[in-house]
Amino acid sequence: MTNVDFQPIPEVITPKPGVLTKMEQTMKTYTIERKECISIHDIASDQADRVINFPAESLYAIVPASYYGSHYTTHRTVESTLRAAKRQSGYSFAILDDEGNHYMDNGNGSLEIIDF
């Protein structure tokens, strides 16, 4: 029988209420407000606001319709955003920035802002 050297489990540090972590201090957010009457294609939810967190250096988010759940992805470049959008083809989604501007793929490898 061999001796096993057990390491203590590190203590989980809970931040104090009202104190932001370093990541939260650099993160931008955009809130999609809850709507009463929506279609399954809407990115707004009829249950609650959807908060989109943009980690530092992330410029865009691919936000699927709320029908698919609360997940989303963030991206630092137009290229990665377009690749993710291509993977979402066939599903309802929106491309947003941290100010809530909506974008579409213009077919030339770049994003074009659209009125929404």
Image (spheres, rainbow, N blue to C red):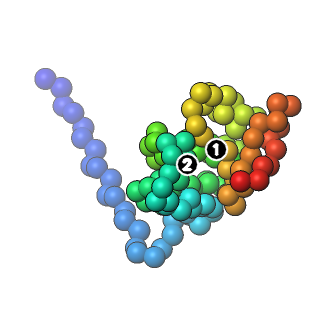
Q: Position of residue 105 (x, y in %)?
A: 77, 36
- Position of 84 relative to 7 (above/below): above
Question: Is residue 51 something that shows in the picture?
Answer: no
Mark closer to the chain start, 1 or 2:
2
Disc 2 crowd rating (10 Å Cα; few below 14, some 14-19, many 20+) is many
Q: Position of residue 1 (x, y in %)?
A: 13, 23
- Position of 2 relative to 82 (above/below): above
Report the residue at 44% width, 55% height from top.
46
Disc 1 crowd rating (10 Å Cα; few below 14, some 14-19, many 20+) is many
Report the residue at 82% width, 44% height from top.
112
Q: Position of residue 42 (x, y in %)?
A: 55, 47
Q: Nearer the viewer, residue 80 or 106?
A: 106
Left or right: where 39 falls relative to 75: left
Which of the 4 image quarters holds residue 18?
Answer: bottom left
Hey, which residue is sitting farthest left in the picture?
1
The mark found on residue 94 in the picture is 1
Which of the 4 image quarters holds residue 32?
Answer: bottom right
Are dots 1 and 2 in contact, CB under 8 Å?
Answer: yes
Report the residue at 66% width, 34% height from top.
85
Circle 2 residue:
43
Left or right: where 27 falls relative to 113: left
